[in-house]
Amino acid sequence: MRSTPSAFQPIADAAKFLLKEDFTPAHVNTLYYWLAPCLAMIPAITTLAVVPFGSTLFGVPMVIADINVGVLFVFAIASLGVYGIVLAGWSSNSKYSFLGGVRSSSQMISYELSLGLAVIPVFLLIGQLRLTEVVRYQIENGWLIAPFIGDWGNFHKWLLAIPMVISFVVFTIAIFAETNRLPFDLPEAETELVGGYHTEYGSMKFGLFFLGEYVAMITGSAIIVTLFLGGWHFPGVPDGSHGWGWGLVNIFIFFSKIAALLFFFIWVRWTLPRFRYDQLMRLGWVFFFEIALVNIFIMAIILAYFPE
């Protein structure tokens, strides 16, 4: 009789990762084999430091590091995650792992270009790289992809929504590719590569790859929410300066938006088939790169000929 998946299965999987014997194959390069899972996990967590996840709580801003180059910090640190995957593929001395590592490096480097170009129109409009200022702008002027939320009453604001929506679509799809999620999960295609770059890994070292992928999803969703969906803001809801209760509400709103995006990530995984590798690379270089580049010129023209 077929068993039904239990709601406690993720907890059982986590316990299995923690309790399973930690085995290192004799044929691997031990130093890099151990280092790779850490490099896959740590950058994904570190990038969360600059994301504002609320307004204020007891007068304290809800951001760990409010630096003036927030988005550059995100790209600089997040790009280090590819080294963990490449090292895992190379140090395992397995052809399946090596192919997965090569696929991942070329895929992530390709879509990082689209990712970076997609956010340039946002900062052409706002004139700031500080993520807290991006949220503040959306509170005062309306969410970047939703002209009906906030003060978007004139033609200029609605016209700006066109490049913003294009940036949002390109950025979101590029996040799918950066986090190796379906339909872009070619680096770990089970039907072709057994398990991809983590074929030779087990116990908690495999668990770190697993956690790193999901933390990267959360980080990507947090950046999307901050740049395009108003961050912790929701119309009619005061910020934390009106009381600590509202500060908690702002935090809840932010994580609710992230949860909605994570649901979308998982829904896509259950819905779409995997791309062929040539289709994946063609999509990144022939379509998204050019679309994101043209979108920058569209934004610049709108700002030049339709000043506020």
Image: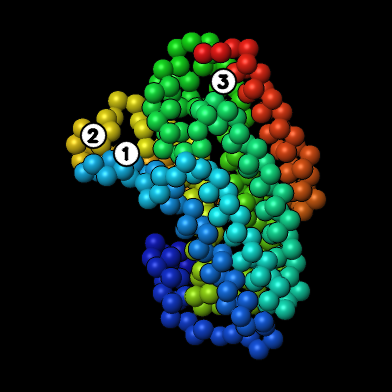
Report x, y in % for residue 151: 41, 17
State the residue at coordinates (52%, 29%).
127
Residue ID for mark 1 = 55
The kind of residue on which mark 1 rests is Ser
The mark closer to the camera, 3 or 2, is 2
Residue ID for mark 2 = 241
- Structural distance between the alpha carbons of marks 3 and 2: 30 Å
State the residue at coordinates (76%, 48%).
281
The kind of residue on which mark 2 rests is Ser
- Mark 3 neighbour class, 10 Å CA radius: few under 14, some 14 to 19, many 20 or more: many
Residue lying furthest bottom: 26
In this view, 169 is above or below 80: above
The color scheme shown is rainbow
State the residue at coordinates (56%, 85%).
23
Report x, y in % for residue 142: 43, 23
Mark 2 or mark 1: which comes first in sequence? 1
Pointers 2 and 1 in contact (C-beta within 8 Å)? yes
